[in-house]
């Protein structure tokens, strides 16, 4: 007799919805997909926030003991844990496995192993513990998902191939949210006080994105009349970064060309993107495996992505020789390309629909289907 499929799923995410982060939007989309299949979904996190979102219950705990108590009290079911951060994600995965949950680990970013290898964090006892926890996710999980084949290969190189089933659940976009809406463009620009010239945009978190290098690179284009819309995730961590960036913009003489909008909902982000022309996406030069959500969201709204990437980047390979996006291998190249794009923004706008059509291949439901099957098998 075929066993019944699970009727409920628990999702653990350090940044649970409605936090405006890539992690929260990924798990929110998965939760909606599961609910459409008749599955009861709830969230578990140790970060503060509301206890309900879009009809989903969110259990918010205090510390590791709180997470343990919540897992102990919850009815056993499949649990989806997403990393980074490796801790407490790995701890939640281990407790859940010991308690009898079916654990699916989602690896979006090899933070500890990559940061240690690149010298971004110093070796030491705490780092060794975090590295062990990151590695131990593969022992705690019954199945593991990666956002790309390149990431799976990188993790295999770091930790060895795990002896559990592996799937690829690629980054993507919620196409019911991020889509081309040229009919709203002029109204949104007027609302924001944007002129008719080129508008650059950055949407996302402020930390770890080299934005302190991006502003000087964009400054020549901004001084010539282009504008920059910063759609930022503002929290306690990012607030000092925002203050520093605003001070830097003032020193560069481009403060009046920059407009800030913080903590927008995904729907509002999409509406604002539709008013823009060129999307800034600075990626660490060493992060070859990354195919970021931001690039696809820009494309879906008709925005021309300007990616700053390393020479072996998967993004570079995706758009090589293509007019749909720019890939810059240095900040000097970024500055030059920004001037070129801003000067010819009318031509750029004519290919907005082509970019939106190209983005359809990155529908997030492809990942949702793969992750649902792993959880409901």
Image (tube, helix red, strand yellow):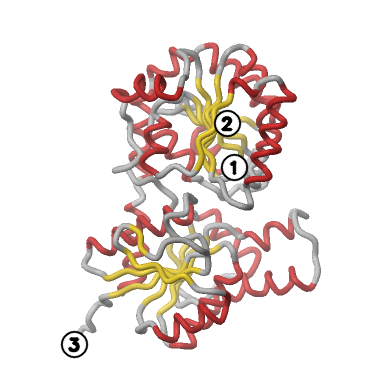
Q: Secondary structure at mark 1?
A: loop
86 relative to 247, above or below? below
Residues 162 and 188: in front is 188
Q: State the CA–CA distance, disc 1 to disc 2.
A: 10 Å
* Callout 3–callout 1 Cβ contact below 8 Å: no
Q: Secondary structure at mark 2?
A: strand
Q: Earlier in the sequence, mark 3 or mark 2?
A: 3
Residue 135 in sight from this viewpoint: yes
User: If the image is split into quadrants, where does the C terminus sit?
Assistant: bottom left
Mark 1 lies on residue: 313
Residue 80 in sight from this viewpoint: no
* Callout 1–callout 2 Cβ contact below 8 Å: yes
Q: Is residue 6 left or right of residue 18?
A: left
Mark 3 lies on residue: 1
Q: Residue at x 50, y 35 (%)?
A: 261
Q: State the CA–CA distance, disc 3 to disc 1.
A: 48 Å
Query: Image quadrant of residue 58?
Result: bottom left
Residues 170 and 180: in front is 180
Q: Residue at x 34, y 21 (%)?
A: 187
Q: Residue at x 29, y 59 (%)?
A: 33
The disc at residue 327 is: 2
Find residue 1 and report its horizontal and vertical position in percent. Answer: 18, 87
172 relative to 154, above or below? above
Find residue 129 and report its horizontal and vertical position in percent. Answer: 71, 74
Find residue 359 and report its horizontal and vertical position in percent. Answer: 37, 37
142 relative to 184, above or below? below
């Amino acid at each position: 007799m075929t066993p019944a499929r699970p009727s409920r799923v628990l999702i653990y995410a350090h940044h649970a919805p409605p936090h405006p982060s890539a992690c929260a939007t990924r798990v929110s989309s998965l939760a909606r997909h599961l609910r459409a299949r008749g599955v009861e979904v709830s969230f578990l996190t140790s970060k503060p926030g509301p206890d309900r979102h879009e009809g989903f219950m969110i259990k918010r705990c205090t510390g590791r003991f709180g997470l343990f108590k919540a897992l102990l009290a919850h009815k056993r079911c499949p649990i989806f844990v997403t990393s980074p951060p490796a801790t407490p994600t790995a701890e939640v995965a281990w407790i859940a496995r010991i308690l009898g949950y079916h654990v699916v680990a989602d690896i979006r970013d090899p933070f500890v192993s990559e940061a240690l290898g690149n010298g971004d964090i110093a070796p030491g006892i705490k780092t060794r513990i975090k590295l062990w926890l990151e590695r131990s996710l593969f022992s705690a999980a019954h199945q593991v998902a990666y956002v790309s084949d390149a990431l799976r290969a990188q993790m295999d190189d770091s930790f060895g191939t795990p002896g559990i089933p592996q799937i690829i659940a690629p980054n993507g976009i919620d196409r019911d949210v991020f889509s081309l809406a040229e009919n709203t463009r002029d109204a949104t620009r007027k609302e924001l006080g944007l002129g008719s010239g080129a508008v650059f945009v950055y949407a996302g978190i402020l930390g770890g994105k080299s934005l302190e290098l991006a502003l000087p690179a964009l400054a020549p284009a901004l001084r010539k009349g282009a504008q920059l819309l910063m759609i930022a995730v503002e929290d306690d961590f990012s607030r000092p970064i925002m203050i520093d960036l605003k001070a830097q913009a003032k020193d560069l003489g481009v403060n009046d060309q920059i407009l800030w909008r913080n903590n927008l909902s995904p729907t509002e982000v999409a509406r604002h993107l539709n008013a823009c022309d060129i999307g800034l996406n600075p990626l660490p030069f060493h992060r070859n495996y990354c195919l970021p959500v931001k690039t696809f969201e820009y494309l879906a709204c008709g925005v021309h992505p300007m990616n700053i990437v390393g020479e072996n980047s998967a993004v570079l390979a995706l758009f090589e020789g293509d007019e749909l996006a720019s890939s810059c291998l240095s900040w000097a190249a970024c500055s030059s390309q920004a001037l070129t794009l801003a000067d010819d923004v009318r031509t750029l706008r004519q290919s907005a629909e082509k970019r939106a059509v190209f983005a359809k291949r990155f529908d997030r439901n492809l990942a949702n289907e793969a992750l649902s099957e792993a959880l409901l098998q």
